[in-house]
Image (cartoon, rainbow, N blue to C red):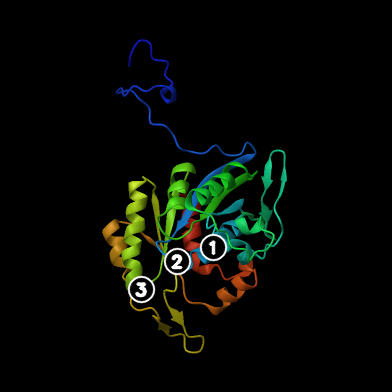
């Protein structure tokens, strides 16, 4: 460091040993006080990531925590549907106000800004990523104990923006038992490690179907290989969720706060202690 150094690395072009890495974190809204941010990630679509997000949010809310969901899946938003939200987001001079479920879960999603929920979002990657940053910076979240970020599938622009711009405390990886998913999970794990984002563990969805008549379990999607992956990465399997028609019915009806939350209870308890 030279004697003339001002300590402001952002305005300096020198490459000295004392140079500080520039933070890419976006500023939160002045009226937001979020204690923990947890991203729910899947390497591919169709594994029930939004279902897991909604169940965990509902479980944490029932435990007495102030909970919010930031729907970062801009082109395929599912969270408003899960909680039966159709209201239009309103704003003040301080920023946008999130919608609230009957149980008090705060939600922000692109579908709450569209005139019709079926309108497609035809945006390129940088614009999608910018919208997610605005959901963090321009929304008055208030006091939140746990914010779940429902991520889009894959490792593209939005995922990079979330990992770099939001203060992510850790991620949950949602997967299913299929062989293809095992390979995709490895990609998601490696991305998280490259971005230095802690991984809480795995949640396996569609793990089995339990016959309501005889109680026998059937592995519809084949034998899971998640234990092998988890062991190789020294990560825990936090939950294995069954194929449950009642869960699907509650999701379609916008009643995810009424769903059976027992399958995610242990995961929610672990997150509350993390």
Q: Residue at x 34, y 56 (%)?
A: 189
Q: Is residue 92 above or below residue 48?
A: above
Q: Residue furthest top?
A: 3
Q: Which residue is mark 1?
A: 76
Report the side of 101 relative to 202 (left or right). right
Query: Can residue 169 be seen at all in this image of the molecule?
Result: no
Q: Residue at x 60, y 52 (%)?
A: 68
Q: Is residue 94 above or below residue 244?
A: above
In percent of width and height, residue 273 lies at: 48, 50
In percent of width and height, residue 138 lies at: 62, 42
Dot 3, how many residues are within 10 Å of its Cα: few (below 14), some (14-19), or many (20+)?
some
Q: Do the residues under discs 1 and 2 have CB atoms within 8 angstroms?
A: yes
Which mark is on residue 200? none
Disc 3/disc 1 C-alpha distance (Å): 22 Å
Q: Which of pointers 3 and 1 lies earlier in the amino acid sequence?
A: 1
Identify the image quadrant of residue 33.
Answer: top right
Query: Can residue 79 be seen at all in this image of the molecule?
Result: yes
Q: Nearer the viewer, mark 3 or mark 1?
A: 1
Q: Which residue is mark 3?
A: 178
Q: Residue at x 52, y 52 (%)?
A: 128
Q: Is residue 123 above or below residue 214?
A: above
Dot 2, how many residues are within 10 Å of its Cα: few (below 14), some (14-19), or many (20+)?
some
Disc 1/disc 2 C-alpha distance (Å): 10 Å
Q: Residue furthest left?
A: 232
The secondary element bearing badge 3 is classed as: loop
Q: Which residue is mark 2?
A: 45
Q: Which of pointers 2 and 3 lies earlier in the amino acid sequence?
A: 2
In percent of width and height, residue 143 lies at: 63, 44
């Amino acid at each position: 460091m030279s004697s003339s150094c001002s300590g402001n690395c952002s305005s300096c072009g020198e490459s000295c040993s004392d140079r500080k890495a520039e933070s890419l974190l976006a500023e939160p809204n002045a009226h937001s006080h979020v204690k923990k941010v947890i991203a729910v990630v899947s390497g591919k679509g169709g594994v029930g990531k939004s279902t897991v997000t909604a169940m965990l949010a509902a479980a944490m809310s029932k435990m007495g925590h102030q909970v919010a969901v930031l729907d970062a899946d801009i082109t395929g938003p599912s969270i408003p549907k899960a909680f039966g939200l159709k209201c239009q987001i309103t704003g003040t001079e301080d920023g946008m106000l999130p919608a609230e479920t009957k149980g008090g879960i705060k939600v922000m999603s692109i579908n709450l800004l569209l005139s019709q929920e079926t309108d497609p979002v035809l945006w390129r990657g940088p614009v999608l990523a910018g919208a997610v940053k605005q959901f963090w910076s321009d929304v008055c979240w208030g006091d939140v104990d746990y914010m779940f970020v429902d991520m889009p599938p894959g490792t593209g622009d939005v995922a990079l923006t979330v990992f770099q711009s939001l203060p992510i405390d850790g991620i949950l990886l949602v997967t299913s038992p299929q062989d293809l998913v095992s390979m995709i999970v490895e990609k998601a794990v490696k991305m998280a490690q490259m971005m230095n984002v802690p991984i809480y563990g795995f949640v396996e969805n569609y793990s089995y179907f339990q016959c309501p008549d005889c109680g026998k379990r059937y592995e519809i999607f084949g034998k899971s290989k998640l234990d092998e992956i988890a062991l190789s990465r020294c990560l825990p399997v936090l939950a294995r969720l069954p194929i449950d028609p009642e869960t699907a019915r509650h999701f379609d009806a916008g009643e995810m706060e009424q769903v059976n939350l027992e399958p995610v209870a242990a995961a929610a308890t672990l997150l509350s202690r993390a």
